[in-house]
Amino acid sequence: MIGTSGYSYADWVGPVYPSGTRPNQFLEHYARRFGFTELNFTYYRMPTADGLQRIAAKTPDGFRFAVKAHRTLTHDRDAAWSPRIERDAERFVDAVVALGGNDGPSRLHGVLLQFPFSFHYTDATRRYLASLLDALSPLRLFVEFRNTDWSRASVLRELERRSVGLVIPDLPRLPGLPVQQPLLTSDHGYLRFHGRNEATWWTGTNVTRYDYLYTDGQLAEWVEPVRALADRARTVAIAFNNHFEGQAVRNAEAFAALIAGSRENDDEESSAAR
């Protein structure tokens, strides 16, 4: 599954959506091009079951969503697990299960737990993460770490034990940021392209930080790793987060074409060998 991180951007009118497209029409246009997206608004405001069902109703059967965890669970959290966070986790689960749980037909690919760079590996954060994963366990979960502290064999083993997916982020090559490795800790893979904008990564806004257009050569670096993941996983979700002026859409469609082209080459080689 290939798509973008969000779809509701005013600066996509023109580059992506036809001129005059209204915000309430964005998703319908988006779903004509992709079968998967991440919901970002759920980070800023707590979702409701009714709201998520209305969103899903705008998409065709088979369309899938990844839902970003609310900020009180990953960023604006208490220092330790607390009754407030427990209540927020329960509210979040009650809403998101409207898209489907782990079993049966579902519009939900999973829940994205994106932690900030400041979420370092300590005894306290390990306990917090374990409590959060327990609280959200009715849902398929994916964890994205933004620093190298969590790049440990023990972390990978624990994620595997819990069947929690590890998000593979493509990021600038800067000290302290995770090194891209095509790892799999559950039956479902997840890769997120954030751009490689080194100049604004630490000082930019949510717009300038992700203002980046991948070259075809940079995208081609990921074709074989993604295919290797797909050989081992039930699904692989790929989301482009370099959303400024529709760059994510351009790169997502270009990457889909590269993947399709590599498969056609394999088919031709296989036919020639017979």
Image (tube, rainbow, N blue to C red):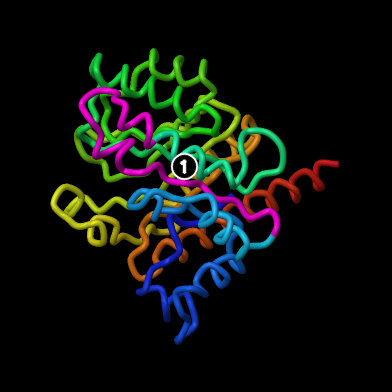
**In the rendered view, does 144 fall on the left or right side of 203?**
right
Report the residue at 26% width, 41% height from top.
Answer: 173
> Residue 65 lies in magenta, yes or no?
yes
In the foreground, 31 or 177: 31
Q: Residue 40 at x, y = what percent?
A: 40, 53
Report the residue at 59% width, 66% height from top.
Answer: 33
In the foreground, 244 or 109: 109
Q: Is residue 114 above or below residue 64?
A: above
Span shown in magenta: 61-88
Q: Residue 185 at x, y = what percent?
A: 51, 25
Q: Is residue 32 above or below residue 181?
A: below
**In the rendered view, does 202 fall on the left or right side of 73?**
left
Which residue is under mark 1? Answer: 191
Q: Residue 242 at x, y = what percent?
A: 36, 58
Three-letter amino acid code at disc 1?
Answer: Leu
Report the residue at 39% width, 65% height from top.
Answer: 247
Q: Residue 121 at x, y = what percent?
A: 25, 21
Report the residue at 48% width, 44% height from top.
Answer: 222
In the foreground, 84 or 116: 84
Which residue occupies the extreme right position in the image? 274
**In the rendered view, does 203 fall on the left or right side of 33?**
left
Q: Quadrant of residue 41?
A: bottom left
> Residue 243 lies in magenta, yes or no?
no
- Which image quarter is the C terminus in? top right
